[in-house]
Amino acid sequence: MIIFGTKGYLYQLAILTLVCARCGNPAAHTLRKRVTKFTLFFVPLFPFSTKYTTQCTFCGAEQQVTREQAEQLQAQETGGRAYGPAGQQPYQRP
């Protein structure tokens, strides 16, 4: 019997102040990276899906962005400094 499946990881990359496209309010937005990994016998082996999103903390609207847009927003927030993998703290989505 072979047991396989997926496991999701959610990384919060930055918190930005942007004008929301849905509600029009200047509010904090979280920039997130969602990675889905293939698992074999409950061991995550390799990522097969990576998505970047921003979510408005005022109205909750979520918007998908490209990797390039996410990198630009993150560089804008950090003032040009780059964070490595050690700067990302994952939490699992239920």
Image (cartoon, rainbow, N blue to C red):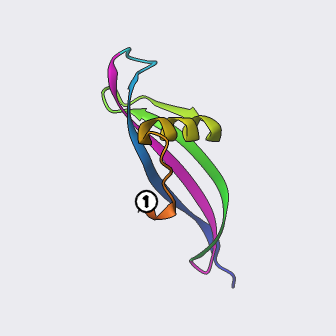
Horizontal and vertical percent position of residue 2: 69, 81
Which residue position holds label 1? 87
Q: Is residue 18 above or below residue 23?
A: below
- Which amino acid lies under the numbered mark 1 shown in the image of this protein? Gly
Given the current orientation, which residue lies at the most extreme front position?
80
Residue 86, compared with residue 49, is above or below; it is below
Q: Report the side of 85 relative to 94 (left or right).
A: right
Q: Is residue 67 above or below residue 56?
A: below
State the residue in front, 39 or 75. 75
Q: Characterize the magenta stretch by its predominant secondary structure.
A: strand
* Residue at the spot 52% in from the left edge and 49% down from the top edge: 33
Query: Where does the image place residue 36, in percent across and percent down from the top left?
Result: 59, 58
Label 1 residue SS? helix
Q: Pinpoint residue 93: horizontal percent, then vertical percent.
A: 43, 57
Which of the 4 image quarters holds residue 30? top left
Q: Residue at x 62, y 51 (%)?
A: 50
Q: Is residue 31 magenta?
A: yes
Magenta region: 25-42
Q: Where is the C terminus found, in terms of image quarters?
A: bottom left
| Quadrant in which the N terminus appears | bottom right
The residue at the point 56 percent across, 39 percent down is: 70
Residue drawn at x 56%, y 77% as measured from the top left? 42
Residue 5: quadrant of the picture: bottom right
Quarter of the figure with residue 71 = top right
Magenta-colored stretch includes residue 89: no
Residue 56 at x, y = what percent? 38, 30
